Image (tube, rainbow, N blue to C red):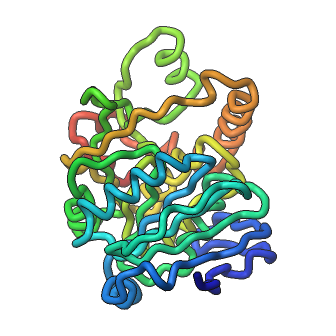
Amino acid sequence: MQILDVLCHPQIMTKGVGGALWSGGPVSDLGYSDNTDPMQAASSCSGGLVVSVVSHGHGPLVGALLQDLARYCKASVTRVVLTLNQADEPLPPHQLWPFELQLRRNQQPLGFGANHNRALCDAKEHCVCVLNPDVRLTSDPFGALVAAVLQPGVGCAYPVQVDGVGKEQDSERALPTPAALWRRRILRHGEARVDWVNAACLVLPRTVWQQVGGFDERYFMYCEDVDLSLRIRLAGWAIRRVPVVIVHGGERASHRRLRYLLWHVRSLLRLWLSPVYRQAKDLLPLDIHSSRRIGPP
């Protein structure tokens, strides 16, 4: 096992290209040198796709996801960065993976956006992917997702999400204005429009990821995907839905635990007070749901 120097100065407060804050924090980076296919490792610096996965004690789920990636995605994924956000999380099994596998273990837990920003800050691949640890794959979605973001004007692509029995999940949402949340949560109405998509599986060109500065780390948890979607669109890029399927049936912790609910409320307040939200509210088109394409303003 080899120590990899991919910290991107974690003790220094830096700023992403697009203005998103990357705050420092103590982390260590671990990488396998004896269980990575050398051809895949060599190709990861010149093109391809790097996938960032963050585990918050998701050991068995992460193991299953890595096996899915190895089984279905040999041709599309060149590197996987797995961040273990809890100090006592077990390492994945040693085996010959068909992609380069890099491990990062945090000494102290970091937020969703901070973890992905650090995992992708040294990316040399053409495209980057943010992927939840509780996703399962039944085929390779990444070839089509990468092809979509290589189209002119497309800054992000995402798949259709279904649960374990094949029911489509509500991963696409309207701008979370107070009125929209009232219609959704209290009146139980469906979304009338699509303004953003959740971050369970997002593929972006590396240049777009760098342009917008990754996630805004001021959102510790919740609304960072809303903010990212809006900033991509305000920068003039479309977000494209691609007809490939992933399985994602994860429960929302904010529905069950008070601490997560408070984080959710705090993030919403931060979003509503942000210039990104104000710009989006003024500029976004009125109805783009039917197109399945989240275009720029």
Count of numbered marks: 0
Which residue appears farthest toward the top when viewing the image? 187
Asked if 1 appears above or below 290 in the picture, the reply is: below
Asked if 291 appears above or below 177 in the picture, the reply is: below
In the image, 149: left or right of 235? left
Which one is nearer the viewer's eye here, 11 or 278? Answer: 11
Q: Quadrant of the N terminus?
A: bottom right
- Residue 42 at least partly seen: yes
| Residue at (38, 39) in percent of width and height | 248
| Residue at (65, 55) in percent of width and height | 89
* Rendered location of residue 45, percent (x, y): 41, 88
Which one is nearer the viewer's eye here, 71 or 171? Answer: 71
Which one is nearer the viewer's eye here, 46 or 100? Answer: 100
| Residue at (32, 78) in percent of width and height | 48
> Picture quarter containing residue 195?
top left
In the image, 23: left or right of 226? right
> Picture quarter containing residue 247?
top left
In the image, 29: left or right of 94? right
* Rendered location of residue 155, percent (x, y): 36, 63
| Residue at (31, 88) in percent of width and height | 39
* Rendered location of residue 40, percent (x, y): 33, 83
Asked if 17 appears above or below 141 in the picture, the reply is: below
- Residue 279 at least partly seen: no
Which residue appears farthest toward the front when viewing the image? 94
Asked if 223 appears above or below 229 in the picture, the reply is: above
* Rendered location of residue 274, percent (x, y): 67, 47
